[in-house]
Amino acid sequence: MSQRLTIPVEHCGTMADVRRHIDALDDRIVALIAERGGYVAQAARIKQSADQVYDGPRIEYIVDRVKAQARGLGAPEAVVEAAYRAMIDAFIAYEGGEFARLHAPASEPQAPQGDAA
């Protein structure tokens, strides 16, 4: 049995109405994901070791926190947990790539190309 939502959701009379509201929510969600990505990129800059990119205790803290928020809002916990775990996995991959890019050793100077003297 699902909990009752504690946030207002507008009644829709047609699928077009439902889709319009979902599209508007998606616009906001994508903007928030982009903002989150900016902070993840900063984490990649700040961390000193690639081993720090994956932080199991932090992941579990986040998942527990958002599941509690879902419960309080009457949202489906399983959906929130699955969405967050997928997002965190994708951001770990992104952060790992950013870490590698930002912490790569400076390339050695290249000799100018052209005719040898």
Image: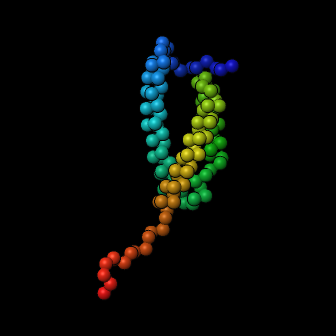
Q: Nearer the viewer, residue 65 or 30?
A: 30
Residue at the extreme top of the image, as rendered: 13
* Quarter occupied by the C terminus: bottom left
From this view, report whether residue 43 is shown above or below residue 10. Answer: below
The residue at the point 33 percent across, 76 percent down is 113
Q: Is residue 26 left or right of residue 86?
A: left
What is the quadrant of residue 5 in the picture? top right
Figure coloring: rainbow
Residue under the image location 45 percent in, 18 percent down: 17
Residue at coordinates 57% horizontally, 44% vertically from top-left? 88
Q: Position of residue 86 (x, y in %)?
A: 59, 41
For the view shown, which residue lies furthest in the right direction? Answer: 1
Which quadrant does the N terminus fall into?
Answer: top right
Camera-nearest residue between 86 and 62: 86
Picture coordinates of residue 47 (x, y %)?
54, 56
Q: Position of residue 31 (x, y in %)?
A: 43, 37
Residue depicted at 63% across the width and 41% down the height: 61
Residue situated in front as seen by the camera: 14 or 102: 14
Residue 62 in view of the camera = no
Q: Tell me, yes or no, if residue 83 can be seen here.
A: yes
29 left or right, relative to 110: right
Image position, residue 7 (x, y; %):
53, 21
Callout count: 0
Which residue is most to the front? 115
